[in-house]
Image: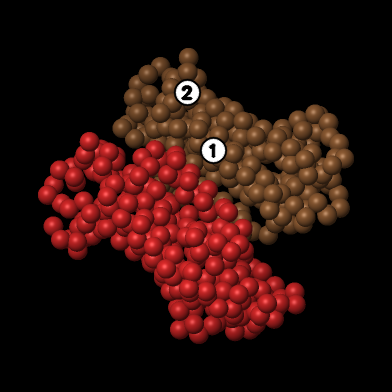
Chain colours: A brown, B red
Amino acid sequence: MTLSIELMKLRRTGYIPAFLAGGILASAFPLANMIFRAEIFTGLPGNPYGILMRANWQMMGMINVLISVCGACIMYHTEYSDNGAQKMDVLPVRAEYLFLWKFLITVFALAIVTVIEQITIFGCALYWYPGYETAVSDFIKGAVFQWAIVFPTVMLMLLISSACNNMWISLGIGVILLFIMSILPEDNFILNLFPFCSPFQTFEEVSQNGRIPLFLSICSSETVLFGAGEELYQKIRRAVQ
Amino acid sequence: MNYISLLCVELKKIHRSKIMLILLIPVIIMWIPSIINADYNFDTKGIPISPENNFFIQGFMGMVWFMIPATIVICTVLLTQTERANNGIVKMLSLPVNTVKLCLAKFTVLFLLSLIQMVLAVAAYYFCALIASGIQDYPFFLELPEVAGTVAGIYVGTVPMAAVFWMIAVIIRKPIFSVGIGLASIVPSVLIINTKIWFLYPMSYPFYLLMVEYGKDAKGIYETEISWIPWLPAAILIMAAALCISCLKFGSSERR
């Protein structure tokens, strides 16, 4: 029941079209790179999928993070503008469940975005590298990994948005966190596990270092941790209000 | 109401918005890695640049590329949402106030907030250069006129971009699209400054100006002279068009 309410709230915010547009825009990077300067990339040694991910994922990952930040801000903006959140408080609905549904919707929307992006990358690899052979399982592995490493960022961003009544503050915090993570040194492995930094990692590079299980377990524990943070925040909010 | 009093009203509206914190935090944070890694400035990897110029350029790079445009987008959200909450904009439009002046007053606020951030950035630069000089025992300071000149140039370069972001915020009412387009348009600017049509893309102007400064300090990195001729007319045209559209469209959906 609450899922349908959450979806209804988002119906007129343009949430799903915005995510789709984000996925299409992100896919434009590898396409533009291959259409205008394919010779730079086709000459490189190595796995075509890895080459394309290395060349484009920094920007595509950035689009994914930006769209998650925007999405989280909008989800709670619809609650806080016109005091929707107060009205939800008097209904027999727990704020934590609302949060959880919002998380699931964002994650689902991100899945669509990631699939669009990965299809483009694999499509470019198959088209511009004749003789490149890949299996559906590679596609699924890559897509699931790139999708899962954005979870902590989404969870943290939703937590921030649920705590800030004003959209510019949650947006500001999100953008500042992204900025901080972008100026920190990239080669530090511990920093790469942090939210806002993990979405920029690529399946190829992480699997070469044999860190896929580590990344997935750390990212899922971060996600659970931030989810628990929201639970705690709601408890405090109810106690204080 | 004349323009100045409208501007004062607009500044009062954002008085308690905590926007100053959002302007200040990135300015301070951007220098922390520069201080910690101050010794990297001596290892220029074969690029002919002096350590003090390297410190300045590297510190400002992330700021100019990402944070300045993103801050302007955040400020447009602030300016539009403070009005839309509780239908403030409807009340403003029912007063005998010229909407063009109101729109320009709001744009001026955007412009002032960006100016404040630039001044804070220069102040933070000197403060951090002081700390880095103390740690490394090497003077990282550049002359104030040089720093102020470069930063002022970058600031003027952000104005057409601010006008475009303001236009997007005025004509697109759904915040997810206005914010999303604003933030997403920052990402390709790194690619666009290396193409021939960079002057048609206002989001790349500040980064272009910093790269030209980099080119002047380190020969061979980028162009050493600003190509005024396609740039200046294009920038003025884009800015004028964006401001005209935003003035015409301001409040149109509320007046319907």
The residue located at (37%, 47%) in the rendering is B169
Q: On the rendered structure, is B178 left or right of A133?
A: left
Residue B32 in view in this figure: no
In the image, what residue occupies the spot 42% across and 32% down? A13
Q: Position of residue B29 (x, y in %)?
A: 54, 62
Residue B193 picture quarter: bottom right
Note whether residue A135 is visible. yes
Q: B51 above or below B179?
A: below
Image position of A217 (left or right of B135):
right
Q: Give the SS element for disc 1.
A: helix
| Residue at the image point whose x is 38% and y is 42% from the top | B172
Give percent across and percent down for residue B68: 48, 60
- Could you tell me the amino acid type at mark 1? Ala
Q: Disc 2 marks which residue? A: A7
Q: Mark 2: give few (<14), some (14-19) or many (20+) Cα within 10 Å.
A: some
SS at mark 2?
helix
Q: Is residue B53 above or below residue B166?
A: below
Q: Which residue is mark 1?
A: A21
Question: Given the image, on which type of amino acid does mark 2 rest?
Answer: Leu
Q: Quadrant of residue A79?
A: top left
Location of residue B107 in the rendering, given as x and y in whole percent from the top left corner:
31, 57
